[in-house]
Amino acid sequence: MRPTPPAVIVGSVVWGATVLCFVCYANSTGPQAEQRASTSAAETPSAGPPSMTVAFQQPAGNDQTRTRPAERQDPGAGFASVVSAVRPAVVTILRRGAAQQHVSPASGPIFVDPYSQKGMRVGAGVIVDSRGYVLTSLQTISSETELWVKLHGSQTTALRAWRVAEDRAADLAVLRVETGTALPALRLADSDLLKMGDLVLAIGSPFGFAEAVTTGIVSSNNRRLWLEGHRFDDLIQTDAQLNPGNAGGPLVNIHGEVVGIAVGMLAMNSTSVGIGFAVASNRARALLGDL
């Protein structure tokens, strides 16, 4: 057998190397290579920050449970819970005398009067001490000595009440009723912390509708004005609607705390225009501190 020429051997080696390189290149760039790369990437943990991974994961179970309550809360339901909590401490106050004891001007800032109903004057108040202390306005009780208080849920029974303290400059008064049991009472808030735009609720007996609720905001927390010859230096102004019968009723914040006592409103041609005034709770706190 004749020996293979060196040139042939060299050519075969070169050809084989070329074929091997081509196969390797095809394996590294073809569909199988892409599949292997995808599988490897899926099996390899992400090198990114954990917070990014969590942000894009679907929460287990109902995804609504991960939404912040403040974003899901129904404002109406929120007000309903506040009203439900404060109404038991709001009372209806009655005294004799169908005729007004003063004549309010047709326009301008005026006192919120009790409502005249069947020979009685009907206003409101709020229990601020479980022993039976009721905070109201002087306009609600006037100079009468025979006063009655209807507690929450009472349709016919009225308890006799006694005047125990008053602040004529602030148009505030404190009554006392005795039941023999502890009564639901509301806490006085620090009215100095009120800000313009804070939500407030007014509760009273407008036109004789006991424990009716209106809502608004604090329009001013330091309003100076005259109400029928009486000067006030630090009234809370609100757009919560006040009408005859709201006199003495509480103005409460969304935490169910008393921030003021309704005493006045702005009238145009004897009609309320939706601007009300309340004595700040800190002024009432000073009166209660004397008891």
Image (cartoon, rainbow, N blue to C red):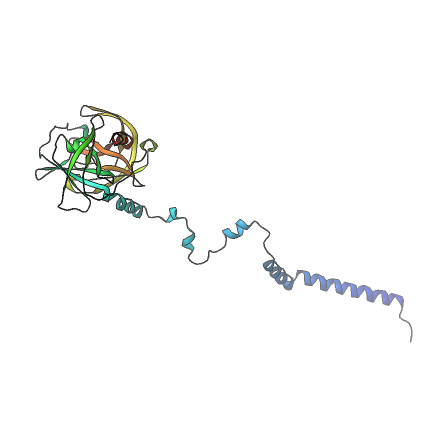
Would you identify the image quadrant in which residue 186 lies?
Answer: top left
Question: Can you name the residue that lies furthest to the right here?
Answer: 2
| Residue 112 in view | no
Q: How many marks?
A: 0
The x and y percentages for residue 249 are 21, 37
Tell me: residue 225, above or below residue 13. above
Would you identify the image quadrant in which residue 26 lies?
Answer: bottom right
The x and y percentages for residue 55 are 50, 51
Image quadrant where one finds the C terminus = top left
Tell me: residue 65, above or below residue 233. below
The x and y percentages for residue 148 are 14, 38
| Residue 217 in view | yes
The x and y percentages for residue 16 are 79, 66
Would you identify the image quadrant in which residue 141 lies?
Answer: top left
Question: Can you name the residue that lies furthest to the front here?
Answer: 180
Question: Can you name the residue that lies furthest to the bottom here?
Answer: 1
Q: Residue at x 30, y 34 (%)?
A: 218
Is 255 or 180 nearer to us in this picture? Answer: 180
Q: Is residue 60 left or right of residue 237?
A: right
Image quadrant where one finds the N terminus = bottom right
Is 262 or 175 nearer to us in this picture? Answer: 175
Q: Residue at x 28, y 38 (%)?
A: 252
Q: Is residue 42 left or right of residue 283?
A: right
Q: Residue at x 19, y 41 (%)?
A: 91
